[in-house]
Image (cartoon, rainbow, N blue to C red):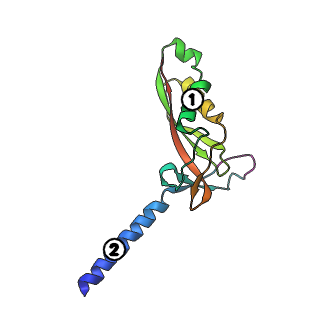
Amino acid sequence: MNKRVNILLVLVAVASLVAWSQVRHVTTVNPMSPNRSPYDAIEVYEFDYVDVQPQFPGGEHGLINFINKTREYPYHAYKNRVQGRVLCSFIIGTDGKVSNIRVIRGSQDETLNREAMRVISEMPRWKAGKVDGQAVAVRCVLPIAFRL
């Protein structure tokens, strides 16, 4: 009987840890938009932990085409033959708008970082991510490559 109770306790503990770890993938972010108080905050889900992930209009192929059409190589970086990849994070809101753009890992040339942020800021509305059928804010990470 004791073994059954111990096994049951272990199963409950494991289930609790799994549930707790899933909740940890929700963070609170201050969007700092003009319509909100700096003290307001929104819950943001991580990209891999939503039921339906946000989608760019036209899918992944549309996203690649958009980046290639919108991205302009900064003159200073082009002249100095600077190449690199800028890793950015941003939030797709419940309405599909892009916000909170940040450089996670940038280039040595600041002009590449600014250009990557500009490209992301010009993105059209995405199809919002969903959890349990409800639209939720989702954090996405996207690399923008600069190759000569």
The residue most toward the top is 79
Residue at image position (66%, 42%) is 125
Mark 1: few/some/many CA within 10 Å (<14, 14-19, 20+): few
- Image coordinates of residue 39 in percent, x first then y, are 67, 55
Residue at image position (62%, 59%) is 134
- Image coordinates of residue 114 in percent, x first then y, are 59, 28
Does the magenta run of residues contain 35? yes
Q: Quadrant of residue 65?
A: top right
**Looking at the image, is 12 positioned above or below residue 140?**
below
**Looking at the image, is 87 positioned above or below residue 110?**
below
Gap in Å between the C-alphas at discs 1 and 2?
A: 48 Å
Q: Is residue 15 left or right of residue 121?
A: left
Mark 2 lies on a secondary structure that is helix
Instruction: Give residue 11's mark.
Output: 2
**Looking at the image, is 120 positioned above or below residue 46?**
above
The kind of residue tagged 1 is Asn
The kind of residue tagged 2 is Leu
Residue range corresponding to the magenta coloring: 31-36
Judged by depth in the image, the label closer to the viewer, 1 or 2, is 1
Residue at image position (43%, 61%) is 21
Instruction: Give residue 65's mark.
Output: 1
Q: Quadrant of residue 27?
A: bottom right
